[in-house]
Every structure is written in C-alpha cells, then in structure tokens.
Image (cartoon, rainbow, N blue to C red):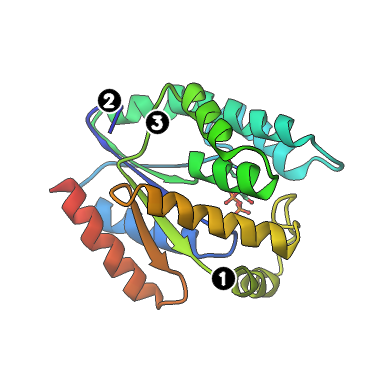
Amino acid sequence: MTAGRGAWITLEGGDGSGKTTQSNLLADWLADAGHTVVRTREPGGSEVGQLIRDIVLHHRGDIAPRAEALLYAADRAHHVATVVRPALERGEIVLQDRYLDSSVAYQGAGRVLDGTEIRDLSLWAAEGALPDLTLLLDLDPAAARRRLDSADKPFDRLEAEKAEFHGRVRDAYLALAAAEPERFLVLDATASVDDIAAQIRERVAALLD
Ligand code: TYD
C-alpha cells in the first residue's frame, strides 16, 4: 500500500459481473468483524466526482476518447485526495467499486488508447496510489449482457458499447491481473454468490492478518 495505514480494496470487472453483490457481502462481513468500512466508487465517489460521473455516463452525444480518459482521471485525482487517502490515514478500510484498472481496460483497451499512457495518467492523478487488493470478477461479455438485459435498467454510455468493446475490456483486465498477481484476486463470476464471497473473505482475512 502506498497511502496511509488502513487497507484499500478495489472491485473490478465488466458491467453485470456482480461487483455490487460481492461488495455488499464483504462490507457486511468486515463491519461485523468490527472494522470501519468506507464504501466508495469511481466515477462519482466525491461531490465533484458526481458531476463528472454525470458527464461521462450520461452525456448525450460523443465524447472524444482522450477527453473521456481525462474526465475519469480528474474524478480519480479528486477522489483519492479527498476521500481515499484521508480514510486510509484514519486507519479505515476503503472498499471501492472500480479504480485505475477500469481506465486501462475501458479507455485503454475499449477505446483503443495506449494502456500504459492511461495507467501513467491515472498514477499521476492519484500520486501513485495503488490498492492493497483488487478483486476481479471475470465474466464472459455475452453472459454479462444477458444479466444486464434481464436487469431491465437503461444502459449508460459504456454499457451501451458493442460486444467487441466488452471483449477487449475483459482481455485487458485478465492481462492486468496476470501482470500483478500479488495485487489481484481473479474470481470466476459464474460461480455461486456464496462461493465467490468465501474466496474473497479468505483473501481479505489474509490481507488484514
Ligand atoms: P459503474 O459505476 O460500475 O456503473 P453502474 O453503476 O452502472 O454499475 O461504472 C460506470 C461505468 O464507467 C462502467 O461502464 C465502467 C466505466 N468506467 C470507465 O470506463 N473508466 C473508468 O476509469 C471507470 C472508473 C469506470
């Protein structure tokens, strides 16, 4: 961990991979064990971030890929400075939906920008902060799409992208996890909710030990 004394856990994965379900279960488990948990997300984990979230997810019409990358990076810069670092410095556990791996996967691979440049941009924005643990819920994009369709919610700008986009996102996530096996735990999102939760708890228990 590069910031503070608490622990920082991020959840990553394609849309519809079950991040929210697992995040809820992990938060309850941590709270039951007596930890103070700060739940947050990108984009939109701060007041400024909410405004940026509204642009990147709901703007009608195109946003140039580099502008989109910078908007996510701006959200990240403000969020890490004002929410994540202070919580870690207070010794709390930050449980965060999405972080810079999302940018490398969606803006890098999805929008076909240079993944290394996108990662460097995010690291600059966040002054080098990296999570202690990143939980990657891996799911085939076709299965994810079926889940999203059955959820009957309107798609945001990223969710509405084509299957090839989401295929590139998935491949990029798996490549990131392979490059940093000590930071990532890759979970098969087709396993049962309970199975996945148990694997997560085992790894988080080891982290907090
Ligand atoms: P999310 O909050 O997970 O959406 P939802 O609330 O609908 O589950 O994420 C919003 C979208 O933003 C998601 O499609 C992925 C995308 N995203 C990026 O493209 N780059 C990023 O850096 C981040 C953090 C998210």
Q: CA distance from mark 2 to mark 1?
A: 37 Å
Q: Is mark 3 within 8 Å of ligand 1?
A: no
Crowd rating for badge 1 (residues with CA inside 10 Å; few <14, some 14–19, many 20+) = some
Residues at marks 1 and 3, CA–CA distance in whole angstroms: 31 Å
Q: Quadrant of residue 155?
A: bottom right
Q: Who's the residue at 12% across and 48% down the image? A: 209
In the displayed structure, would residue 140 be above or below residue 126?
Answer: below
Q: Secondary structure at mark 2?
A: helix
* Residue plotted at (47% across, 76% down): 190
Q: Position of residue 30 (x, y in %)?
A: 26, 53
Q: Which residue is mark 2?
A: 89
Residue at image location 27% in from the left, 36% down from the top: 92
The kind of residue tagged 2 is: Glu
Check disc 3 and report its element: helix, strand or loop.
helix
**Viewer-side residue, 113 vs 102:** 113
Residue where numbered disc 3 is placed: 84
Question: Does residue 99 appear anywhere in the picture?
Answer: no
Mark 3, Cα crowd under 10 Å, few <14 / some 14-19 / many 20+, is many
Give the residue at x 69% y 57%.
165
Q: Amino acid at mark 1?
A: Asp
Image-quadrant location for residue 178: bottom left
